[in-house]
Amino acid sequence: MIKAEVLAGRLNVGRPADITVRLTNNGDGTCTNIVFTLRLPPQVPAVRGSRALEAARLAPGESCTAVVRVRPRQAGSWEATSTNFSFRDHRGAAFRVSDFSSPLAVAAAVEDVKVPAPQFDITLSTPVLAHGVWDTLRGSVTNTGPTPISWGRLSLQGPFVMDPTGVSADLGCLQPGESESFAFHVLAREAGREVPVHLSAVCVDGTAQRTENAKKLSVQVGETVTANPDQVRILYLAANPSDAEHLRLAAEVRDIKQTLRLGFERDRFELAEHGALRARDLTQALLDFSPRIVHLSGHGAEDGRFVAETEDGGRRLLSTAGIAALFKEVSDSVECVIVNACYSDDLAQALAEHISYVIGMRSWIGDRSAMDFSVGFYQALVAGRAIEPAFRFGRAAMVAGESNGRGADVPVLFRRL
């Protein structure tokens, strides 16, 4: 059976706060077609986030959450309710709950405690740009302050011709100490040892405080640099919609980075990452980075489609045929695709019509198991193993990390015929 909870911390009049809606399967069988819509009282209006939470399936013990930001208007005891709460149990029987309610206690306004404004640093990771041809300028933004950054935008200026669709880049949520990479597709008009690069950014924290920072850096611009044929570029793309079960994708990419840094052949590998993946981000990232390995992490629908994000962080199911057609256009450079998402074997099989090696998941896979597979795969890869032995090693590492030692048949490798 599905249990619904509305979790709220301290609520004060006039102060923004987050309310979490959590749906948990506390029964013995898998529930499906789960729908819940939160109704807030007029004294506690929502200012951001979706109040609708849907899940295709929840196995016993699994949960999914959605976060809604509110700004209370009046102190008192109020109720959050829902008249749209339904699901099917493991036998297919339909259940509808029409009287759900949860108390919301709102205290009087208090004097705001001063929170430090966002602090961040901008660095470049591209040492040399080619002159007179299109190239990619890369770098990262790091949260150097004590508070999380909820959103940011980075802009580039300099003696470059810039792709009209890429003169600015949006930044996602950054916890203290975390970094997010960026890439600009540019054509350098000037050659030199220190060609100026002007980067400016604005970042906003959870209380709507904003900080602007401009930095003048430089990059060497010379003749066209011949790519190293042994260099392996990995493009990590992740989507975790706000109305889906939370996945530890930031932890996964952190572990992959550490694995590549510690590997014997670490100098051959280059990793770029992109979170909150939308359909347009997928196409742009493939063009910008020209990867050899593409790693897709996130949720998969039971019909095999990959779940990307919308502009507001909701879910968007991507067409299997559409993704396959896209990868057909980059099959000359992409050698391997990993779809680390549940029920992704149909997508992997479709991609294998164009890509030499594609890894998918036959069924549901837990968050921890997915991370163990990824780390094991890249451990073998950076140790010099080829794709197929690396796949087997990743599968073995995943099974070794499971308490019951099962799941060896979940990862599957397809080869282009």
Image: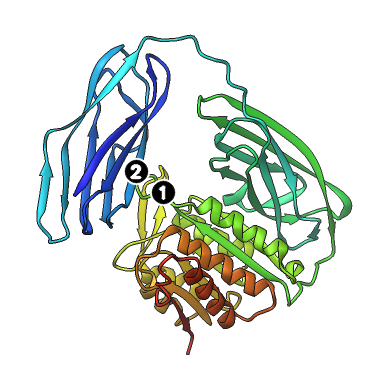
**Gap in angstroms between the C-alphas marked 2 and 1:** 7 Å
**Residue that appears at 64% across and 50% down:** 181
* Residue at left offset 22%, top offset 23%: 79
Answer yes or no: is residue 329 visible. Answer: no
Q: Which quarter of the figure has residue 263?
A: bottom right
- The image shows residue 3, relative to residue 295, as above or below, that is above
Q: Residue at x 51, y 13 (%)?
A: 112
The image position of residue 95, as x and y in percent, is 11, 49
Where is residue 59, by image quadrant? bottom left
| Mark 2 closeness class: few <14, some 14–19, many ≥20 residues within 10 Å | many
Q: Nearer the viewer, residue 377 or 396?
A: 396
Q: Nearer the viewer, residue 199 or 24?
A: 24
Residue indicated by mark 1: 246
Asked if the residues shown at circle 2 and circle 1 are in contact, with their CB atoms under 8 angstroms apart, the answer is yes
Residue 46 as seen in the image, left or right of residue 78 = right
Q: Position of residue 385 (x, y in %)?
A: 65, 80
**Quarter-wise, where is residue 307 in the image?**
bottom left
Mark closer to the chain start, 2 or 1: 2
Q: Nearer the viewer, residue 154 or 71?
A: 71
Secondary structure beneath disc 2? strand
All told, the count of numbered labels is: 2
The amino acid pointed to by label 1 is His
Residue 185 appears in the picture as rendered: yes
Q: Position of residue 144 (x, y in %)?
A: 68, 35
Horizontal side of residue 85 vs 329, given as left or right: left
Q: Residues within 10 Å of mark 1 (few under 14, many from 20)?
A: some
The amino acid pointed to by label 2 is Thr
Residue receiving disc 2: 65
- Name the residue located 69 percent from the left edge and 36 percent from the top edge: 200
